[in-house]
Image: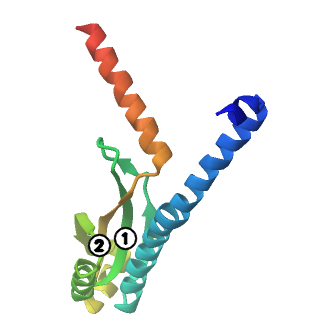
């Protein structure tokens, strides 16, 4: 204990910073980094499924993440537009359902392409399919901490108003 008292503030902060780095680096390397890689890989596998099935991927736009109130997970939505045969879209959705990762497909809209392409589409049986694919991921610890603080502030504000 006497040795700690002999250290200057600068030395104490250096030791504290080193301990924090030693704890955070493995956390990032073993948990956060691989989680991000899994999300990127899942997006690429889904896009590859569509292309392998002969679907033209016209739109693959990742939307803003939606954090759950618990702060434990986040929804990662991707807006998708595919052009191809009806059965190919069905095969695509079937492959998505068999992924190890949970992927929800919502707001499915199917239509025949615009009038200029309608004659050609009618002959080939192509349709335009728009949907939103949503997968889930862990929340970054910094974001989770900030969300917890915001919830506490909101609870304090509600309690003060009563």
At mark 2, the secondary structure is strand
User: Who comes first in sequence, dot 2 or dot 1?
Assistant: 1
Q: Is residue 1 left or right of residue 94?
A: right
Quarter of the image for residue 16 reads top right
Q: Badge 1 local density, few (<14 within 10 Å), some, or many (20+)?
A: many
Q: Badge 2 local density, few (<14 within 10 Å), some, or many (20+)?
A: many
Residue sitting at 44 percent across and 61 percent down? 62
Per the image, the residue denoted by label 2 is: 129
Q: Position of residue 76 (x, y in %)?
A: 38, 58
Q: In the depicted view, which residue is nearer to us: 87 or 97?
A: 97
Image: 1 above or below 162 = below
Residue sitting at 29 percent across and 80 percent down? 99
The quarter of the picture where the N terminus appears is top right
Q: Position of residue 127 (x, y in %)?
A: 28, 79
Residue sitting at 30 percent across and 9 percent down? 160
* Cα–Cα gap, marks 2 and 1: 6 Å
**Total numbered circles:** 2
Image: 147 above or below 26 = above
Q: Are marks 2 and 1 in contact (CB under 8 Å)?
A: yes
The quarter of the picture where the C terminus appears is top left
Q: Is residue 90 left or right of residue 128?
A: left
Image: 99 above or below 143 = below
Per the image, the residue denoted by label 1 is: 81
Q: Position of residue 114 (x, y in %)?
A: 34, 71
Q: In the depicted view, which residue is nearer to us: 19 or 148?
A: 19
Residue sitting at 37 percent across and 83 percent down? 50
At mark 1, the secondary structure is strand
């Amino acid at each position: 204990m006497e040795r700690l008292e002999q250290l200057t503030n600068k030395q104490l902060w250096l030791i504290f910073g080193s301990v924090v780095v030693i704890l955070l680096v493995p956390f990032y390397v073993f948990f956060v980094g691989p989680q991000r890689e899994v999300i990127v890989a899942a997006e690429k596998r889904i896009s590859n499924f569509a292309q392998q099935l002969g679907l033209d991927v016209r739109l693959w736009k990742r939307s803003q993440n939606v954090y759950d109130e618990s702060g434990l997970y986040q929804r990662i939505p991707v807006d998708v537009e595919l052009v191809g045969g009806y059965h190919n879209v069905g095969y695509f959705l079937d492959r998505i359902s068999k992924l190890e990762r949970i992927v929800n497909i919502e707001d499915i809209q199917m239509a025949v392409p615009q009038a200029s392409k309608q004659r050609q589409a009618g002959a080939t049986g192509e349709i335009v399919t728009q949907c939103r694919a949503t997968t889930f991921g862990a929340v970054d610890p910094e974001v989770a901490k900030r969300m917890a603080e915001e919830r506490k502030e909101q609870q304090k504000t509600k309690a003060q108003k009563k």
